[in-house]
Image: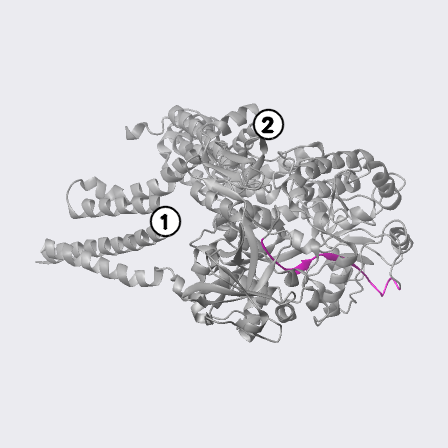
Amino acid sequence: MQKKLIAKSLAASLALTLVAGVNTVPASAADKELVVWADETRGPNLTKTLAAKSDWVSGYKITVKAFSSFDALKEAVDKSTDLTGPDIILGANDWVPTGAKNGKLAPITLPASVKARFTANQLFDLSYKGNLYGVPLDINNVGMVYNENLVKNAPKTLGEMVSYYKANKDKKGLAAGLCIAGGGTSWGAHSVLSALGGSAYRMKNGAVDTTKDPINPAELAKNIKTYLLDANGKSNGFFPATDTGCKDNYLAGKVPFAIIGNWEWQDYMAEGFQMNLMPVPGVKAGTSGTMFASVSGAMLTSFAAKRGVEAGAKDLLINFFASTAGAVAYQAIELRPPAEKGAQTKVEFTAQQNFGKAASKAGIPQIGAILNGAAGSKSYWDLLPAFWTAVLVNGKDPQTEATKMNGFFVKNVAEGVKDL
Amino acid sequence: MLEKVKHNAAKVLKYLFVALTSALLLMLIQSAFAKKEYEIGAFLVLALIAILVTYFSNVSIPLKFFLPGLLFLLAFVVGPILYTVVMSTFQYQTGNYISKPEAIERVRALGVAPDEAGTTFDVVIGKYNNQIAILASDPINKKYSINTLTENIELAVNVVSLDENGVAKEAPDFSPSNTAEIAALDREISNIRFKYSGDYFISLQGTSVGAVARQVLDYDKNQDKFTNLINGNQYIDNGKGNFVNKNDSEEVLQPGWRSPIWFSHYIDLIKDKNVRSPLISVFIWTVVFASLTVLTTFALGLLIAVAMSKPIRGRRVYRSIFILPYAMPSIMSILIWGGMFNTEFGAINTLFGTNIAWFQSATFARVAVILVNLWLGFPYFYLISSGAMQAIPSELSEAAAIDGATPRQIFYKITLPLLLKIVSPLLIASFAFNFNNFNLIYLLTGGGPRNELDGQIAGATDILISYTYKIAFGSNVQDLGFASAISVIIFLIVASISLYGVKKSKVLDSFS
């Protein structure tokens, strides 16, 4: 009796395993499926684009997996293996060095005719040690908008903006003069730092200029004292050290100038605001602060080759992501400024075009190898917010703090250029 | 008769349980081996054998009860500890994730350079004399060729059929493959190097583009080194998971691999000033934080338990209210408290009419951390103390009262010592938990405040685990090996303190 029961239970367990196993066997390479991973907005929008027209690559089925957030996508990419990972990732340009170092990304060689559809900066953004790892998808940048109900004409200098704020602060109940609504007080605020005379690194002829310090502490301190501080060395309220409440205040008409991200322009237009986008004006007329104009990319993984779909994945990159038709179709739903030159003039909304123009006028490449703290644990992302807090909240001496920040920037530039 | 039915039913249930467990394990074993997770697969096989032997024989009756717990203990406690210890002896960081054979394969794949002109061709994939081949077109210069693995056959423009863009679609003896055939051959064609000129070959970039390139880095398996075929530079294994230039150790080939470096991380912990100095201050604050948390939460919990032990009006309502902070998800509570401590908009400053920058000052941030943890932790000790006090025989206090002891004396001389005897293991567990209370620090203060511009790495409220997280994941280089080494140190500290506490309190004496 007992032996029979044992035999039966073992048989049952085997049967159950087989039934369960049917659903767990990985898809075979013969299916020729191209898997694309994307975040919570790009994923669903790409799915819709491909549903409308799916024959970008003949002989392959394209599957898009959307993650719940950009961070969730990044985490999944970090943990991916050749058995679980995708063939193409839609991600940030600063994922390229890490992905290449970890052997997760694979290079692609584009024909000259395809390269010509992008700027050198955009291709540089997706390159590491001379190899290109994907094709540019959309531009990530910020732009300054001004409330035309408060300010009639586009400002020409930072001083003009400060004067307006001081004259109308009490009269119109302004919460600030210029604030960061999108991109935070490090990424989004680079154009403010730059308008005041500083920078994370200097660019010269399309390359990082290591001969010049990113910041001249005396000049930056002088400009901060002139434009951001009052006679007692306290913040004059024109530029807050935090981005909290900026968007709401701008939409409520309490802030005349705001720096917004190119992913959120619809929120402003929905409230009746114009997309009069421009870079932050500098202290002298005709100058402006530079902004990070990085690209998101469609990146090729090394998993594609292991799964036997590398040729198909490269076709998808060239025929869809790097083509005018593909970029127009995708950005008609995604609504970001496309990186592809032909699509930039063909996208539907002015805001998409104007963000692209602002990036062309005052954009600098976002070089993760320098910004992420190549010389140690001090990254640009931590240092600039700390600088604003020290100077605008804690009332510390701008020149002393600028000197400290410049010291870290110089070291990061020196180390970072070795890893380009 | 009824007994026999019950006996057989129990047996059937047992066999059903074992069958279902075996089925689940077999499925997981298959999945683990399919995903090349051999260590996990091997453990699951051993677990399956242990289950079958234990439940289908009478080798040990107690084991039938202990086995599930034992297996979970091995899988989720012992396994991760061993893995962390092993990883602490490896170079395991960004750039050193994969195995050495995989790294060699990737370095070879990346060790290819395009020709100076960046020549590319429009190509059609097909067969030439039954060999796989490409029909390559340079429409601008009107150059056409058929390229096989061994031949580059140039074609005159008048022998090929061109499309409207001047790209050759057909040629003599060349039969194009259809899209389905090409897709089926993807793995093969992606790796083919079609003959071009000299060292140069054409590699496919998709199914319709070919790029001219040559191999620059060559791997010598016997000598385990890479050689740059252009300038002769040699790259040798540096013993730390990378091939480096023999004459310039700064020049490293990427990617590297996970490589054993034994105790290097532990030596760095002692030698590297940047790590050692903050580590000491962080350790001191961690001990203070964990101790103060246990002390304050236990004191408040006990105080309320004593108060609630008296017959007061609305006691049930009060009890429910006191348990609420414990019932609410701690993550939500921490985030709400974070908002309440906000300098400009927070309820705390508004209510008290103050303007304290709670998270900008080291002292205030630490006070805020302790206060929030007190809110989160006191209901637990209130519940524990309430239960434990009921277990203390009331005759003891009654006898003491008859002997003339005051209520305070009864509490300090009888109730508290007996209570401590009961709750000591929980106090130790609470200390160990708070020693690693990552959520609170990460969500409330992020470890701050820290003055980045003065070069501070650790923040004023960073505890060891949040500091470890910063080292492991806080920058562009994720140093998992180094973080594992710090985790091992934390484990040893917590284990030692807990062991000492357990020994001192003699809480395990009753089991011996």
User: Which x, y percent locates residue B206?
Assistant: 53, 62
Does residue B417 appear to the left or right of B58 in the view shown?
right
Q: Amino acid at mark 1?
A: Lys
Closer to the chain start, of discs 1 and 2, is 1
> Dividing the picture into quarters, in which one does residue B140 lie?
bottom right
Q: Label 1, on which residue? A: B36
Q: Amino acid at mark 2?
A: Ser
Magenta-span inclusion, residue A382: no
- Asked whether the viewer can see residue B345, the reply is no
**Residue situated in front as seen by the camera: B60 or A28:** A28
Residue A357's spot in the image, x, y percent?
A: 77, 62
Magenta stretch, residue numbers: A133-152
Question: From the viewer's perspective, is residue A162 above or below residue A201?
Answer: below
Horizontal side of residue B218 vs A125, given as left or right: left
The residue that label 2 is drawn on is B281
Mark 1 nearby-residue class (10 Å; few <14, some 14–19, many ≥20)? few
Spot occupied by residue B316 in the image (x, y as percentages of width and height): 47, 50
